[in-house]
Image (spheres, rainbow, N blue to C red):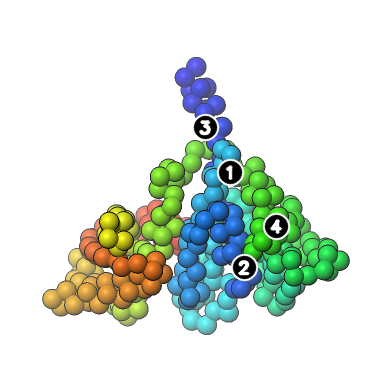
Amino acid sequence: MMAEHEDAATAATRCGFVALIGAPNVGKSTLVNALVGSKVTIVSRKVQTTRALIRGIVIEDASQIILVDTPGIFAPKRRLDRAMVKTAWSGAHDADIVCVLLDARAGINEQAEDILANLANVDRPKLLVLNKIDLIAREKLLALAQAANQRLAFDQTFMVSALTGDGVDDLRKALAAQVPPGPFHYPEDQMSDAPLRHLAAEITREKIFRQLHQELPYQSTVETDTWTERKDGSVKIEQTIFVERESQRKIVLGKGGATIKAIGAEARKEIGEILEQQVHLFLFVKVREDWGNDPDRYREMGLEFPKE
C-alpha cells in the first residue's frame, strides 16, 4: 500500500531534459530567459568552450523542465572540436525532448539544413520553434513551417517571439506536459545558481585545458562545491579539480603552486566578468582514481561515455 502511495506522489510531478538545438544567433538565450522568466542565461562568447550546459530550469505547474544547450553546431576544425560536435549531437540523443530553434528571418539556410539533416538520426520527440516571428509576414512563416516539416517530421511546431514573449507560454506548457513523470532533479532552493555552478566549473576546466592540454588532454573534471553570496556583494566559489593520478595532481598544481594560481586567476577573471561581481575562487585538486571508467564523470562533463 505504501509503495502505491509513493508512486502516486512521484507520478504527480514531471521532470526532464530539453535540448535546445540551433545555429548561433537564432535567439536561444532570449528564449531561455523568456521561458525561465528571469535572467539566468549565460551567453558564452566562445561557442567551443561549452558542451552540455544547463541554461535554465523552468517550473511550470508540477513539471520541472531543465533546458540544456547543446553547443558545437559550428564548423569543426580541430579534432577536439569534432569530438565536441559529436557530443553536442549525443546530447540531443540523451535529452527527453529536442527543441529545434530556427530564426524565422534567416529561414532554412545552410546551417539549418545541416541541423535538420543530422536530426533525422535522433530518435526523440522533436519540436520545431520558429523564433523572431514579429519580424516576418504570416504567409512566409507558414511556408517556412511547412518546408521544415517536409524535411523532418516534427511532433509539434511553435511560432514565438522570444523578445516580446509572444507564443512562449504555449511552448512552456507543451514542454511541461511532455517531460516524463518523475521527481524533480533540482530542489527549488538550488535552482537559481545551478546553471551558474555548471558554467563556472566549465570555465575552470577550459582554463586547465588551455594551460595543460599537452600534458593533461582530458584527464580532469571540475565540480563546483560551494557557491556563497557575501554581504559585500561578492561571491565565494569553491571548486574541486579531479584528476586520475597523483602525477597529474602535481602537473595541475605546478612548481610552487604556480600553475593552479594561473588557472585560478584566469577562471576568476572570466567568471567575474560574466557575473558582473567580484569573485573569490578557491581551487582544490584531488585524485579520484579510475574516474575515466566512471560514466557519471563523463555525464558531468557533458561527454558521451564510450561503451567499450
Circles 4 and 2, Cβ within 8 Å, touching? The answer is no
Disc 1 target residue: 60
Q: Which residue is mark 2?
A: 27
| Mark 1 touches mark 2? (CB < 8 Å) | no
**Residue denoted by label 4:** 166
Residue 162 image position (x, y, % from top left): 65, 62
Kindly indicate whether the residue at mark 1 contacts the one at mark 3 (C-beta within 8 angstroms).
no
Whole-number angstrom distance, CA of label 2 to CA of label 3: 34 Å
Quarter of the rendering containing residue 150? bottom right
The span from disc 3 to disc 1 (Cα, nearest Å) is 16 Å
Q: Residues within 10 Å of mark 3 (few under 14, many from 20)?
A: some
Judging depth in this view, the residue of 118 and 201 nearest the camera is: 201
Q: Looking at numbered disc 4 in the image, what kind of residue is underneath it? A: Asp
Which picture quadrant has residue 154? Answer: bottom right
- Callout 1 crowding tier (Cα within 10 Å): few <14, some 14–19, many ≥20: some
- The residue located at (74%, 52%) in the rendering is 155
Sequence-wise, the earlier of marks 4 and 3 is 3
The residue mark sitting in front, 4 or 3, is 4
The answer to which of marks 1 and 2 sits earlier in the sequence is: 2
Q: Secondary structure at mark 3?
A: helix
Q: How many marks?
A: 4
Label 2 sits on what residue type? Gly
Q: Is residue 205 above or below residue 61?
A: below
- Quick one: which residue is furthest to the left in this view? 256
Lower position in the chain sequence, tag 4 or tag 2: 2
* Disc 3 residue type (three-letter): Thr
Q: CA distance from mark 1 to mark 4?
A: 17 Å
Residue 10: image tag: 3
